[in-house]
Image (spheres, rainbow, N blue to C red):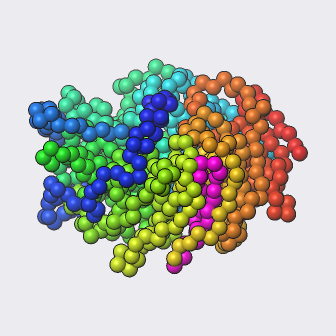
Amino acid sequence: MKAFLLAITTTLAISALYGCTGPSINVPPAFANGWTATPAKKTMRAFRSEQELASYLHELADKQKQDRTRMEAQQAPTANYSADSSVAREKSSDNKDESVTNVQHAGVDEGGIVKLHGDHLVVLRRGRLFTVKIGDGELRPVSAVDAFGPDIDPRRTWYDEMLVSEDTIAVIGYSYERGGTEVGLFRIDREGNLSYRSAYHLRSNDYYSSRNYASRLIGNKLIFYTPLYLYPGSEDPLQSFPAVRRWHKGAKNSEFRRIVSASHVYRPEHEIQSSYGLTLHTVTVCDLAGGDFKCEATAVLGPPGRVFYVSPESVYVWVNDWVRHGNQMSAQSLVYRMPLDGSGPSALGVSGSPVDQFSFLESKDGHLNVLVRSESVGDGMWGAEVAAGEVALMRVPLTSFSDGSEAVPSSNYRKLSQPECVSGQGCSYTFQNRFVGSYLLYGTGSGWGYPQKADRAHLYAVRWDEDEDETGDAHVLSLAHGVDRIEQMGEDAVVVGTDGRDLHFTAVRLGESPEVVFRYTRKGASQGELRSHGFFYKPDGPDSGILGLPISVPGRPGYRHLFEESAKILFLRNESLHLEEVGELAAQPKRAIDDACRASCVDWYGNARPLFARGRVFALLGYEIVEGSLDAGRLHERRRVSYAPQWMQVTRR
């Protein structure tokens, strides 16, 4: 349950035990149990009928029993596990609104807490939706509604993210009370007024990740990835398959409508070692055109562990299985590719696991590039925060995907430098990685834990688009701080991290040979937000722009952003990688009020964002939106508005 701080602190303790060195294995990895070398089909095989699918699951259940009996007899240790193909992919929306979300891919919007719709900002906060007008030079609250239907009990439900398609707002949440993903649909008109339309309940398990987002939007197509843990031995295993129902008071389970048929359930040709569970990894596509909610799904069978990534072309799901070799257990993985153009899913046998969605890049040269670690467990819950072990870069052509009977050759893995601990200064344990331009960048930092007191660390830069023979070893750049955030800034990068006392922004030029160009230090500060959406860079030229990032008091551990608001948002100007502070927009804690919160009372997805819209600069800080004005290169507060329930007032300076 993500609501318990104990789970966070336990995860941080585990990650500290991992340190920076993890168990040693050989990378590139090999598959000890062998994969077939027979010619493979280009896509996985779907089940032909409900009967064939049910029979397969029952056979799998029998095999699971045999495997468990054998393992118990041997007293073996157990392992811990922390797009609809019929719908053609739409191109990016024709909506001309600016984006206020720091997304991984242009044209693939990600569920977040603030969006721009016409002349209005739309904010999701603590179980409510709000609109604030910014058109015509205004800053004025307009409308507020509950982020759930009038006949829904919001207790034990987390309304985490939203997306906007034309005049429809989709709020995505997970209900522990009702057991599944909830989608609430709301209408927003040109004046910013909100009204509830309907709510839908999708059968799924919890999608939460400390880094990833559950939903994406391409055009009018709302795309979900959700895991669904199966119990093949049940009398009717198909009864728990992905389904959707329209919510109303007194809704019954019998009203669920299956959204994935047997002919849209795929399995790899390689045998699934399912002793530790079986998961239906499901990509659901819902059409929001016209305010409707027509959903269909495609699913693949696999083991529980997962990381998912959405490119403009496909959804990828990387799953980890555990197999026995004598008295030892080892991870064996598959990566599924589920295209958004209507073609069938495919798979490849792989090894290791990505850390998070930023470990992936589907590049324009027709390749999938993935950073993997030998001791990574995926990004479910806080899994991304405990990745450890050796590091490799896998690069494969998309044409190599097939029915899952083939594995990526060892020659397609390039062994990379493993982050090192700083002697005598403790060990930064949280791994960050990002593809920026032609480079893969990675390093370690403090993450959700207490700031690491280290005055030097390393950033590793690797060309992903060339062979190892052409590039040699990774470029190792020395930093005066840990690596807590890696972001793109034009054609280059900025790395944000702490030395335990101060917050640093290091500008990195990504040319023929990457180099550190400049470092800006904000004394006595820490990051106020950890999620990728907390950062935004707004270019205003090929080598210039403004970036914003929430900051907080010095020494604050990362997990405190769940319970404490950011103190302010810091804005820096980039001029050819020279960073200079232009100002800050601060919160006013004395203006905080009791909002009578009924749902989502912990800010799992954050509560502060820098916003650049209509040529203006804003800071979202809890229930306040502060506007700044740039004058002679300096940012000054112009006015602020509170959009909190029952207190909507504007003050000017």
Q: In the displayed image of the protein, which residue is found farthest to the right?
A: 653
Q: Establish if 181 lies above or below 178.
A: below
Name the foreground residue: 218 vs 375.
375
Was residue 175 drawn as part of the magenta stretch in this picture? no
Which residue appears at 70% of the width and 52% of the height? 523
Q: Viewed as shown, does residue 26 lie left or right of 548?
A: left
- Residue 27 locus on image (x, y percent): 28, 62
Q: Main secondary structure of the magenta part?
A: strand
Q: Establish if 233 lies above or below 443.
A: above
Which residue appears at 17% of the width and 37% of the height? 76
**Is residue 234 visible from the viewing direction of this image?**
yes
Q: Viewed as shown, does residue 501 lie left or right of 52?
A: right
Q: Quadrant of residue 41?
A: bottom left
Was residue 495 drawn as part of the magenta stretch in this picture? yes
How many badges with numbers are in the image? 0
Q: In the displayed image of the protein, which residue is found farthest to the front?
A: 424
- Residue 290 locus on image (x, y percent): 55, 45
Which residue appears at 56% of the width and 46% of the height? 451
Which residue appears at 57% of the width and 32% of the height? 602
Name the foreground residue: 24 vs 513.
24
Task: State which quarter of the image contains the N terminus.
Answer: top left
Task: State which quarter of the image contains the C terminus.
Answer: top right
Q: Viewed as shown, does residue 566 lie left or right of 332?
A: right
Q: In the displayed image of the protein, which residue is found farthest to the top?
A: 250
Q: Which residues are magenta?
A: 487-512
